[in-house]
Amino acid sequence: MRNPFGRRDSAAAPGSDTNTGTGTGSGADTATGSGAGAGTGTGSGAGTGNGTGNGTGSRADTGAGTGAGARADRDTGARTGPRPVPVTSHRAARAVLAVVAGALPALAFPEAGLWWLAYVALVPWLLLLRTAPTARRAALEGWLGGVGFVLAVHQWLMPSLHVFILVIAALLGLLWLPWGWLVRAMLGDGPSGLRAAAAILVIPSGWLLIELARSWEGLGGPWGLLGASQWQIAPALRLASVGGVWLVSLLVVAVNTAVALLVVSTAAVRLTGLVGLVVCALTVGVVWWGVAPPREQGTARIAVVQPGVYDGVAGAEQRFARGEELTRELAGQDVDLVVWGESSVGADLTARTDLAARLSALSRAVDAPILVNVDARRSDRPGIFKSSVLIGPQGPTGDRYDKMRLVPFGEYIPARPVLGWVTSVGKAAGEDRRRGTEPVVMTLPPEDGRPPLRIGPLVCFESAFPDMSRRLTRDGADVLVAQSATSTFQNSWAPAQHASLAALRAAESGRPMVHATLTGVSAVYAPDGGRVGAPLGTDRSAAAVYDVPLARGTTGYVRYGDWVLYGALSVLAALCAAEGMGALRRPASELRVPRARTARGSRGRRER
């Protein structure tokens, strides 16, 4: 057999062995051990050895040498030179990097508002996933990055949900687990030009499926869609008019993927990344020049009443009184509609006829209908509803919209028998709100020979759902109105983020949108998504009148709906089919071969 120093021993007899050797060199070794046989040998290093054996298998090596290269080598594990980094430390560092990299895109949203960061924010995460040692590790780092993303984008929920936000982030983060695997499959191991080109479509398509799954109301709704970070960029809003926020998200992730290819790959693949960037730029240019903005046809004067923060037992009454005061200031300003925020009325108007009378008096004073929002237990059916109610000079007109999509934990507890304990650790709903059954388009009375104005109300985070505003537009709404209240998150990023969503909904539908809140931020957007007038911030208690441009026509998104999502599904289906047929399979020489592992100091290692 081969001994630890590369010399070959010859056996003489099976009982005891004696090894001797002399020589000159840079080192001297002395070995004692047990074994069977006897032999002599000479080698390149000076050394003497002797040994006796009884077959017990015990062994100890000692060595001493002289000269410039004197060496001591023991099987007890002593080594010279730099120590390798422990595997556990390396994995822990990658785990931390994954969480941080996943959180980075949150800075592209309001209030940080670094919209340009969205186009490179995913690159560190992509590079990390690309270099994952195994597919399983890539999936794990995809999940960890997803946890970081959810925590960063929804950090304003922490005061309400406390530690439960970690549970939610861990569960939602699972949506990124297959995406991590997908990124490594497309970008890892030095992708070919064909695979790199496919990655620019496949990786954004995988991201879109995550956003689609997150858009389900039960998982919190479509808050923090990456495309929504571009709410104030005119070319991105034009893209939204064609394919919704989904098309914007697709483009943003495609740019990130192309940049990642530019950073780490070979010259041929870098060229693919560059071509990808050019194609993305050309897509934006073609849409910008080829798709006309909505054509304005008249205006409507709409007032927003924002009373400010009123908490405590008497908060609802004080808020109502402040809303009255601000609304009376609008008398003589020739408004077509006055909009109050979510939960602006804290009692059912059928039961509280005094409140209904006060509101109808306000309508007569300003010579315009008032859209209020009632958050109360209804007298004609069981349960608490959040309802948009239109008030005219003679009282409620009969137009009423009951909120259909409720905020998980804020307005109802999913699986309350199991998760009801959340109310003891956070500000979760003590009683579930009831849901409405269908959207409603309300028609205002015609004035001065003009056609009647038709409004489509949404309540609170319903403005985050592209399909709801699209449905109202198809049903004939001229103006979209979102009534909201974010006083619970007053000093966080939530109010600004919520207001920004109205810009996307306006651009998608080609209809103006009014975002009216109790405590800010209230804002109005034109049919192309551009801002109208100055918003009312969270520090304001005021009423403001906006000349809102109206528009006709149908956008590509209203006409064709979520075609981008169907396209993403098709891309992933094509990838699965191609992989199944081996069309994009890597050459066998490029496949990873895991190295065999041996225990330190094992006989197998010593005999190599």
Image: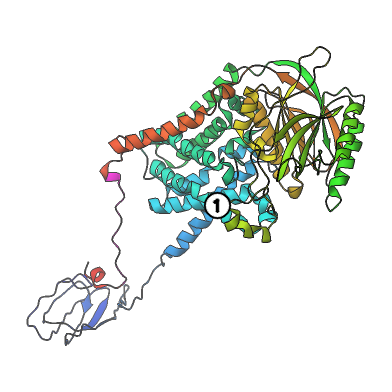
Residue located at (65% from left, 45% from top) = 407
In the displayed orientation, state which residue is furthest to the front.
380
In-image side of 152 versus 187 (left or right):
right
Q: Nearer the viewer, residue 288 or 401?
A: 401
Position of residue 289 relative to residue 63, above or below, is above
> Which quadrant: the N terminus?
bottom left
Residue shown at the point (24%, 71%) measured from the top left: 606
Q: Which residue is mark 1?
A: 147
| Left or right side of 600 for 11 | left
Q: Quadrant of residue 589?
A: top left
Residue 165: give x, y in percent of width and height: 61, 55
| Image side of residue 176 versus residue 35, left or right | right
Q: Please, which colouring scheme is shown?
A: rainbow
Q: Nearer the viewer, residue 206 or 46?
A: 206
Residue at figure coordinates x 87%, y 31% from the top left = 360
Q: Tell me the amino acid under the disc marked 1.
A: Val
**Is any atom of residue 602 visible in this view?**
yes
Residue 159 image position (x, y, % from top left): 70, 55
Give the mark count: 1
* Residue numbers of the magenta segment: 589-600
Give left or right: position of 568 versus 478: left
Residue 446 colored magenta?
Answer: no
- Secondary structure found at label 1: helix
Membership of 597 in magenta stretch: yes
Task: Examine the residues drawn in magenta and state their main secondary structure.
Answer: loop
